[in-house]
Image: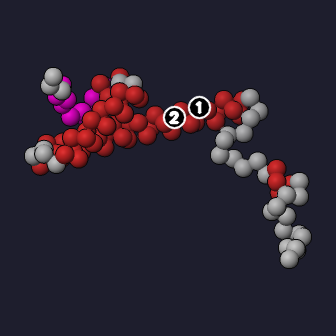
């Protein structure tokens, strides 16, 4: 069974924003596989690479938007975002206590 041929996506293509994140990722994986074979003509490889860059940028934009949404939800619920340090160990005299000399 032959694989469906994809046309390179235009930056302003509404199809790009209509695709789910999973569809973007799946297409990006297909592009990587095609480029890794090295069997594509140079012009086709360049078109695939350009499409891959657009897909990667769109995926990255969506991930950043999701991270911002999660941060807002956590703040509204009184929680800290996962990447914020808790400071529990230093505030309660944990390993990072700089006032005490190291015991040798």
Q: Main secondary structure of the magenta part?
A: loop
User: In this figure, which residue is indicated by the disc labeled 2?
Assistant: 65
Examine the image and state in which quarter residue 22 appears: top left
| Foreground pick, 29 / 14 | 29
Provide residue 50's location: percent of width, then percent of height: 24, 43
Q: Which residues are magenta?
A: 4-14
Q: With respect to residue 98, does 91 lie above or below?
A: above
Residue 12 drawn in magenta: yes
| Foreground pick, 26 / 13 | 26
Provide residue 65's location: percent of width, then percent of height: 51, 34
Q: Which residue shows up at 76% across the image and 48% down it?
A: 86
Label 1, label 2: how far apart the Cα atoms are: 6 Å
- Outermost residue toward the left in this view: 41
User: In this figure, which residue is indicated by the disc labeled 1?
Assistant: 69
Examine the image and state in which quarter residue 47 appears: top left
Examine the image and state in which quarter residue 60 appears: top left
Provide residue 44's location: percent of width, then percent of height: 13, 42
Q: Which residue shows up at 84% across the image and 68% down it?
A: 98
Q: With respect to residue 95, does 25 lie above or below?
A: above
- Counting other residues with Cα less than 10 Å from the Cα at mark 1, is it few (<14), some (14-19), or many (20 or more)? few
Provide residue 27's location: percent of width, then percent of height: 30, 32
Quadrant of the rendering where the C terminus is positioned: bottom right
């Amino acid at each position: 069974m032959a694989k469906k041929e994809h046309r390179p996506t235009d930056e302003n293509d509404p199809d790009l924003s209509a695709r789910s994140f999973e569809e973007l990722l799946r297409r990006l994986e297909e592009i990587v596989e095609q480029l890794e074979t090295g069997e594509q003509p140079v012009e086709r490889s360049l078109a695939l690479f350009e499409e891959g860059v657009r897909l990667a940028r769109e995926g990255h934009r969506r991930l950043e938007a999701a991270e911002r949404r999660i941060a807002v939800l956590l703040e509204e619920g009184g929680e800290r975002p996962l990447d914020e340090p808790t400071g529990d160990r230093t505030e309660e005299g944990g390993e990072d206590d700089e006032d005490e000399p190291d015991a040798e």
